[in-house]
Image: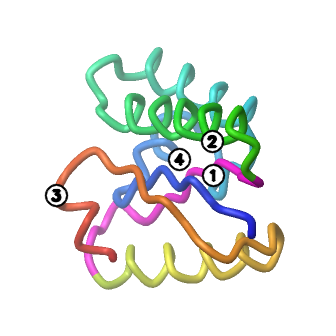
Amino acid sequence: MKTLVIALDRDDDVGRKTGIKSPIVGREENIEAAVKLGLADPEDSDTNAIFEAVKTYDRMLSDGMEVEVVTICGDARVGTRSDIKIANTLDKVIELTKATRAILVTDGAEDSEVI
C-alpha cells in the first residue's frame, strides 16, 4: 500500500509567491518549492509544512514503507473554490501514484477544514 504524505497549501501561497504549479510531486521538487517559498516570503508557514512533509516522507521511507510526498495547493480565494481545486488535484495525484492512504501535513486549523 502506497501512502501519500500531503503538504496542503489551501490558499496557494506556493503558486502565487513562486510561480510553481500544484501538484508538486517528489522529494527534490518539494524541497525546491519550500526553498523558493522561504526565499520569497521567509515568514510563510507553508514552508515549514512542506519541510515537515519531506521529513515525514524520509522517515517513512527509511522504515521501508512505500511512500510519496506531494504538495497540493488550492486557490487564493479560500473556501469552496479552493477546496474543489484541492479535491480535483488529489484525484489526479491518486491516479498518478496509485496511493491508497494519506497523511496530511498542514500549517494551521484553516487547512484542516478541507478534510
Mark 3 to mark 2 CA distance (whole Å)? 24 Å
Residue furthest front in the image:
63
- The span picked out in magenta is 66-79
Considering the numbered disc 1 on the image, is that residue within a helix, a strand or a loop?
A: strand
Q: Which residue is pictured at 57% across the width and 53% down the height?
A: 5
Q: x, y percentage for residue 102?
A: 55, 66
Name the residue beneath numbered marker 4: 15
**Distance from the alpha carbon under mark 3 to that under mark 4:** 20 Å
What residue sits 65% from the left and 82% below the top? 91
Q: Residue at x 48, y 59 (%)?
A: 103
Q: Is residue 53 left or right of residue 110?
A: right
Q: Quadrant of the N terminus?
A: bottom right
- Give the number of the mark in front: 4 or 1: 1
What is the total number of numbered labels drawn onto the structure image? 4
Count neighbours of disc 3 (C-alpha within 10 A) and say few if under 14, some if 14 to 19, many if 20 or more: few
Q: Which residue is mark 1?
A: 70
SS type, badge 2 = helix
Image location of residue 42, percent across then percent down: 34, 17
What residue is at 45 percent from the left and 84 percent from the top? 84
Mark 2 neighbour density, 10 Å: few (under 14) some (14–19) many (20 or more): some
Of mark 2 and mark 4, the one earlier in the sequence is 4
